[in-house]
Amino acid sequence: MSEDKPNLPAVGAEHGPEHGPMQVAEPIPDPGIEPHELRITDVDPKAADRVERQVAGMFSLAGLLALGSCVAYFAIPRDSVVTFGPLSGNANNLTIGLCLGLSLFLIGAGAIQWAKKLMVDTEIAEDRHPAYTEPAKKAEIIDAFQEGVAESGFTRRKLIRRSLIGATAMLGLPAIVLLRDLGPSPGRSLYNTIWAKGIRVVNDVTLRPIKPSDLIVGQLVNAAPANLNPIQEESPVEYQNAKAKAAVIMVRIAPEKIRTTEERKNWGIDGILCYSKICTHVGCPISLYEQTTHHVLCPCHQSTFDLADGAKVIFGPAARPLPQLPLAVDAEGYIVAQSGFTEPVGPSFWERG
Ligand code: FES
């Protein structure tokens, strides 16, 4: 401990200029470090060996439990139920949870037992020093660390070291096994939506088909393909999947404000353009339209797209424009798709490869 004393006024110089006698703080005496007491494991090598075996036993059991959680994942049917009196739960989840929980608990308990009973427990005090560390001091710290490693017995006590490494390695297995629960690969399903040539564009709330005259300049509507609803009756899950991919926005912009490419110059109808509603960043539905600038904003991370310029990204983390749906008008005057999207909708990594 440092012997330096705080620079306090001496006792007796206790008079302030106007307020009479002052209370002067006395430095708190340094209580020092209590005398070190040896543990049974410090003096009895057999006791130390016994504790070593206990710790190694906990680590080994932790490894087995981690392995047991993987076995439970495959061996216990997903729909099996276990009942304890009035309580019941899914046997698969419960067993995996118990195995992993106990495994982590045993690694923690073993580490505490190791530290309390076997590692060197001499108390030391260190004087405060400036934040800057001299190279010589750094070397000293490294030496102290290496000494600590040696004193912890990590290198010497092979049984503990190997069982701990084994247990933590086993804990990685459940993490890999549980990746299976992410579900099947989407495959190429994200390359297609249910949009196709001749499919009418309908308002996504009223489900009414839309004519060009229904939209005024500056207006934006959320829309969907007319072939979506029959799917709902057949399969609610397929309906949700199809709806999530096919959502679009349709906007009317004064034609002279639109900048487009040669390839896309026939994709709109008198300034009416249609884009995927799914942000190309990570897939949030874009929603906030600013009609004077023709910018549409994704509320998740503020990617901003210019609908008058091919929905190019003008701000934010999205990496590519919103895909555009080519439009036409059918014989009855309703807006239809000329074809499906010519590129995948959604986050841009999906179309990679
Ligand atoms: S999902 Fe749209 S900006 Fe991130």
Image (cartoon, rainbow, N blue to C red):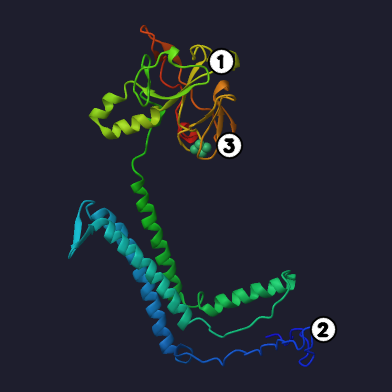
Residue drawn at x 40%, y 24% as measured from the top left: 223
Residue drawn at x 20%, y 54% as measured from the top left: 80
Looking at numbered disc 2 in the image, what kind of residue is underneath it?
Pro
Foreground residue, 215 or 159? Answer: 215
Separation (CA) of disc 3 from disc 2: 64 Å
Quadrant position of the N terminus in the picture: bottom right
Dot placed on the residue nearer the N-terminal end, 3 or 2: 2
Determine whether the beta carbon of the residue marked 2 sits less than 8 angstroms from the nearest atom of ligand 1. Answer: no
Q: Is residue 353 in sight in this rendering?
A: no
Residue 258 position within the rendered picture, expressed as x and y whole percent measured from the top left: 58, 17
Foreground residue, 112 or 165? Answer: 112
Looking at numbered disc 3 in the image, what kind of residue is underneath it?
Gly
Dot placed on the residue nearer the N-terminal end, 2 or 1: 2
According to the image, label 3 marks what residue? 316
Crowd rating for badge 1 (residues with CA inside 10 Å; few <14, some 14–19, many 20+): few
The disc at residue 254 is 1
Q: Is residue 206 in sight in this rendering?
A: yes
> Furthest-right residue in view?
17
Determine whether the beta carbon of the residue marked 3 sits less than 8 angstroms from the nearest atom of ligand 1. Answer: yes
Residue 177 position within the rendered picture, expressed as x and y whole percent measured from the top left: 35, 52
The disc at residue 287 is none
Q: Which image quadrant is residue 133 in?
A: bottom right
Residue 161 position within the rendered picture, expressed as x and y whole percent measured from the top left: 46, 72
Q: Look at discs 3 and 1 and give the one toward the viewer.
A: 1
Separation (CA) of disc 2 from disc 1: 82 Å
- Asked whether the beta carbons under mark 3 and mark 1 sit within 8 Å of each other, the answer is no
Separation (CA) of disc 3 from disc 1: 26 Å
According to the image, label 2 marks what residue? 17
Looking at numbered disc 1 in the image, what kind of residue is underneath it?
Ala
